[in-house]
Image: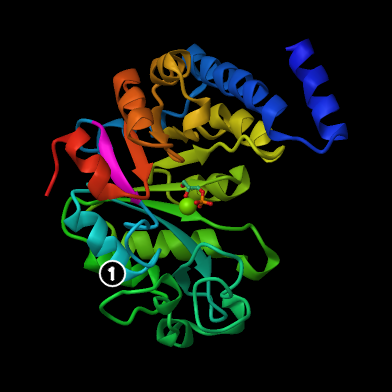
Amino acid sequence: MTSTLSRLVKGALRGRWSAPIDPLLRQVALRSTALISRGRSSPLARDTLGHFPPGPLLLGHRGAKARAPENTLGAFQAALDDGGHGVELDVTLSGDSVPMVLHDDTLDRTTDVFGKPSDFDADELGELDAASWFGAWPRPEGIPRLEDVLRAMPDGAVVNVELKGPSPAWVGLERRVVDVIRAHGARMHIIVSSFHPAQLLEVRRLAPRIPIGVLLWPEALLPLRTAWAVPLLGADAVHPPSSLVDQTFVNAAHAAGLRVHVWNVADLNDARRLLNLGVDALIVDDVAAHAPLFGRAR
Ligand code: G3P
Ligand code: MG
């Protein structure tokens, strides 16, 4: 640990963060899961362990991001059509405080306007062109409300709702999202994830039976705090990038009653490696390419 810290400081001085943080984050994550193994998890978290369908799950990252405009209704349908058990999506707030499905802080990359989502109300965001930036796509797509996506999902679908922020513009995001999930999420398997422990703490406070997953990220200092939060929150899952996951990580998480939902899967070989390790979900851009590994090719 000491040598890792030393590398961390040196890396920071040189402006290179990711290399030294990767092993340090793994240490923190493992120690956090060990804490839960000692009985510090929330009983409420354990109540949710039967919440998910059996077997490893295939989730489309922002929908079927590789072949559809991300975080649109069309992308989510494409992920299901391609054999996914469900989808991962990102949620932010419109100017009139409606949970909207959008990844970036701004509209610049994925729509036909510049600005922030908080500059527009939900109806206006729904009217934007959220597809043309992607290229060929057969139908118009706006920025959907979270409610629209949940209404469109079939019974039994798995939906990973990632909270974006926190930001002063998005105060109240957690409560608004919980309200939508309560109203429209009963037919499916939902888990709320975030890189930010404070957001997950608020979700747990508002709705203790909604599963929560702590996102880990090796390329910033923040994950050092999010990993600490795993036992404190009594989280149901950890959401690490593939680079953090080996057999020790999976065993420690499972021993602590935590599911392992992996994102940033590099390629099919990496996916096979992760499935052999026993992870519980892969969150991938190209759902169709991964579906055969799950026996779900369409
Ligand atoms: O939830 C996994 C992944 O979506 C986290 O990163 O930036 O793609 O939302 P990002
Ligand atoms: Mg995301």
Look at the picture and state if 132 lies above or below 42. Answer: below
Q: Is 80 left, or right, of 23 in this rendering?
A: left
| Residue 281, position as x, y percentages in the image | 33, 35
Q: Is 296 left, or right, of 215 in this rendering?
A: left
Q: Residue at x 67, y 22 (%)?
A: 24
Q: Residue at x 63, y 80 (%)?
A: 115
| Residue 60, position as x, y percentages in the image | 32, 51
Task: Kindly give the residue lying farthest to the front in the view shown.
Answer: 136
Q: Residue at x 24, y 61 (%)?
A: 78
Which quarter of the image is occupied by the N terminus? top right
Q: Which residue is mark 1?
A: 74
168 vs 103, nearest the viewer? 103
Q: Main secondary structure of the magenta part?
A: strand
Please give the range of residues in magenta: 56-60
86 vs 206, nearest the viewer? 86
Badge 1 crowding class, 10 Å Cα cut-off, few under 14, some 14 to 19, many 20 or more, is many
Q: Amino acid at mark 1?
A: Gly
| Residue 189, position as x, y percentages in the image | 27, 48
Q: Is 168 left, or right, of 93 in this rendering?
A: right
| Residue 218, position as x, y percentages in the image | 62, 34
Q: Quadrant of residue 32?
A: top right
